[in-house]
Image (cartoon, grey):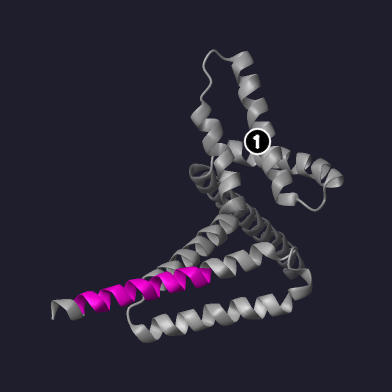
Amino acid sequence: MSAITDFFQKIQNQILEIQTTINQIKTSWENFQKFWDLFFTLVPWEVLLLLIFSVILLSIFNSVSPKTPKTNLTIAVLLLAALWIYFWGLFSKEVTYSKVIIVSLYILVPLHAIGLFQILFQWGKKWYWNKKRIQPKHWESALHQLSLDYHQLVGNAHLNHTEIQENRDSLYKEIEKLELSLKGMKSLLSQTSQTNENQ
């Protein structure tokens, strides 16, 4: 009698294990669906499709020019966007250009965000230092900046004295910096002379 009870108990335990496994799979599937529902509310499904085809094209472009993957991906996205617009125009009366542009930007903006940030950072840095050179706050900072720019120019000129023509652009930049520092000193001198006259 106990053998029969044990047998049924084992079957019941197995059924419970199967039910637990089914519930876990069901929960995992629901979580998976929720994730993709949330993902596609934030990102249009066309982005994923465009990305897949772009990666396929990218592998072809990279075999031709392996040193420019970012440019290759940009060309792939733009080419696919143009084809999308073309085929959409063939099968539909109205083409929503804004949708194609937005979907393309989902890929292109993150791709070029770091490069754009670096360009903006370099521009901001250049603007800050040029302003500091042209508009020094006091005489000591103007002299310090002039000294730095002069030594930088002389150092580069001595370092590249055998290859002046090849390094002409960098020397021009250093000279421009020195000229800006001198301009800042002149403006500071004119300000001090005006204040002395007023007194």
Magenta stretch: helix, strand or loop mostly:
helix
Frontmost residue, 90 versus 143: 143
Quadrant assignment for the C terminus? bottom left
* Residue at position x 49%, y 65% in the image: 126
Quadrant assignment for the N terminus? bottom right
Query: Dividing the picture into quarters, in which one does residue 21 lie?
Result: bottom right
Query: Dividing the picture into quarters, in which one does residue 189 lie?
Result: bottom left
On the picture, is 133 further left or further right than 96? left
- The residues colored magenta run 177-195
Query: Dividing the picture into quarters, in which one does residue 90 lie?
Result: top right
* Residue 36 is covered by the magenta coloring: no
Q: Residues within 10 Å of mark 1 (few under 14, many from 20)?
A: some
Q: Extreme left residue here? A: 199
Q: Dot 1 corresponds to which residue?
A: 78
Q: Is residue 9 above or below residue 77?
A: below
Frontmost residue, 45 versus 149: 149
Q: Identify which amino acid the numbered label 1 is placed on.
A: Leu
* Residue at position x 80%, y 53% in the image: 67
* Residue at position x 32%, y 75% in the image: 188
Q: Secondary structure at mark 1?
A: helix
Q: Position of residue 176 (x, y in %)?
A: 53, 66
Q: Position of residue 151 (x, y in %)?
A: 58, 82
